[in-house]
Image (cartoon, rainbow, N blue to C red):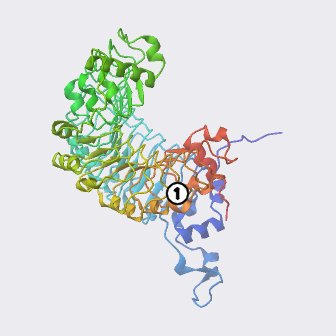
Amino acid sequence: MRHSALFSRQGKEECDKVLTTDLIKETRRTGELDLSKHGLAFVPEKVWTLENLDDIECKNLNVDMEKQDEGEKWWEYSPLTTLNLSNNCIVGIPPDISNLDALTILKLSYNSLQSLPKEMGMLRNLMELYLDNNKLKTVPEEMSNLKSLLVLNLGRNEFESIPFDIACLNMLQTLDLSFNSLTFLPPGIGFLTHLTSLDLSHNQLTEIPPDLVNLLVLKQFWLNDNKITDLPPLGELRKLYFLNLAKNSLTKVPNFMGCECLKELFMGNNAIEEFSVTDVEGLIGIKTLDMHNNCLSSLPENIHLMCQVVRFDFRGNRLENLPATLALLPHLSSLHVDGNPLSEVRRDVVLCGTPYLLQWLRKKLDEANHPEGRAEEDEEVEFPNRFNLRVTRCLNLAKKNLTDVPPYVFDEAAFASVTVVDLSGNRLTELPEGMSRLNKIATEINLECNSLERLPVSIGDFPYLQYLNLQFNKLTDLPESISELVMLRELVLACNRFQYIPPIIATLQSLEILDLKGNTLAEIDMEVLSQLRRLAVLDLSNNNISSVPPQLGNLRQLRTVKLEGNCFRHPRQCVLLQGTESLLSYLRDRIPQE
């Protein structure tokens, strides 16, 4: 008796049967067709002629507008705008794809494509094109005609060079060329002036073209796992907040002077020998700095100027001692220095973790400042001087036990064009009155660990605010004026008293990170979350959520979802441990079919 293979390749006739009559009707109604994960070797022939009716369909077509419920209505037909053919076994796309001239989104990820027809260049309305995880070595030159393209993913293919004039796609916002075999980039890449996300990781690049610094709105840049030896000054990338340079051949820290928005920088596994005083001045606003497995022999004494840093990773270098000024960093919660030949710091101190190590450094700093062992009692709070304000562009009043801040302090901060306000770790019950002086220049406000029970309406007067940290307060709701924060990217509301997700959050269309862990949320409000089109990180851990709506799986833009520490039974812990992608897939599979 013969048995067919469990995953046998479907023939053309079998593939055509996948496109059922009911699916055709639904596609004509919505303009969207999802044929992903069907094991297709061929695209059903009917896909290319969906707008054409056969004889049977013509007979069933209702053209009488007075009969509302009989047959299909021609005026309800929508052209195909979204086509998902990902996760199949498709080896080729026919020239007939040119018939789908209304297509705006085309997904062909995870197939076996080795070539594409030149007719792809006729899809002039295409805005998103996903071709990752195929076997492409080249694409037709006609692709440069896709002038409306905003997202292009060519990752995980077999490209050795960019195969067409990519500079023509001047509306492109997201470009992924990762996991290929690129050895160089064409100079024209600098013309992609709308690019906000660029992934060139896991290639064979030895340098980047000088005109890449023309990408003035670039926010995320992956260049890790290449062979880069040097980089030009990157100060023109003023919007850049994430940069990964790990696993290259860098011997020095690039010039970041001017990268005021840079928050996360990864330079591990290079050959960098020095981290200098000047390097610190170019990284004042950094929050995460990873330089593990380099050749550093010392750290600069002025490292305390990096007053916003949360995480340092200096593992596997050649450090013999640590500057005591590390203890002055108010938010440093993760300091990794193991794997260094430290002579002054005992090994047991390093092994005890960051809090113990910082305590040891703080004691060393106190001994240096007060050699006789006498600390001044009732020391008056010393507000930042003008020089520090100008250098750091940060008003740092963290952990000063303040109940208010004098208005003149904010006057000084405004004069120094301060963009970051750090009032964390105090006893504030309301926002200081003088903060209004900074409402036209502040981009970050940190009010963590205070006693705020409400926010004033005036919080909406900070139109350029991108980061707002309100965790560890006593908030139960947000004012309606929060909707005025049109540039807000990260909102931290962890460890407050929220019983529900504030509906006003739905208006924050630039929001990418939402942290609501450690509250008393009882449910996940999909009406709010579904409106946050850019939301990438969602933390709802340690709440009272009793069920997880399957519709959460439809938020495909999410990169990280944290749901641990809630009381729901499904999904189980084993599903949560598999990561965000598996979790979202699990939830999508449980959406009731209509």
Residue closest to the eye, 110 or 580 = 580
Residue 80 place in picture, x, y as percent? 49, 66
Q: Amino acid at mark 1?
A: Ile
In this view, 445 is above or below 250? below
For the point 25% across and 32% down, which residue is it?
305
Residue closest to the eye, 267 or 357 = 357
Instruction: Return the residue found at the far bottom.
Output: 66
| Res. 309 image quadrant | top left
Residue 534 place in picture, x, y as percent? 43, 54
Q: Which residue is mark 1?
A: 501
Whether residue 301 is visible here, answered yes or no, is yes
Viewport quadrant of the C terminus:
bottom right
In this view, 270 is above or below 68? above
Indicate left or right for 181 with 112 as reference: left
Instruction: Return the residue found at the far right.
Output: 1
Instruction: Return the residue found at the far front.
Output: 377
Indicate left or right for 412 with 304 as reference: left
Residue closest to the eye, 192 or 320 = 320
For the point 30% across and 56% down, which residue is it?
171
For the point 65% across and 48% down, which residue is it?
10
**How many circles with numbers are drawn on the protein?**
1
Residue 364 place in picture, x, y as percent? 33, 17
For the point 57% across and 74% down, which residue is it?
53
| Res. 549 image quadrant | bottom right
| Res. 339 image quadrant | top left
In this view, 294 is above or below 395? above
Whether residue 273 is visible here, answered yes or no, is no
Residue 190 place in picture, x, y as percent? 23, 45
Viewport quadrant of the N terminus:
top right
Dot 1 lies on which element?
A: loop
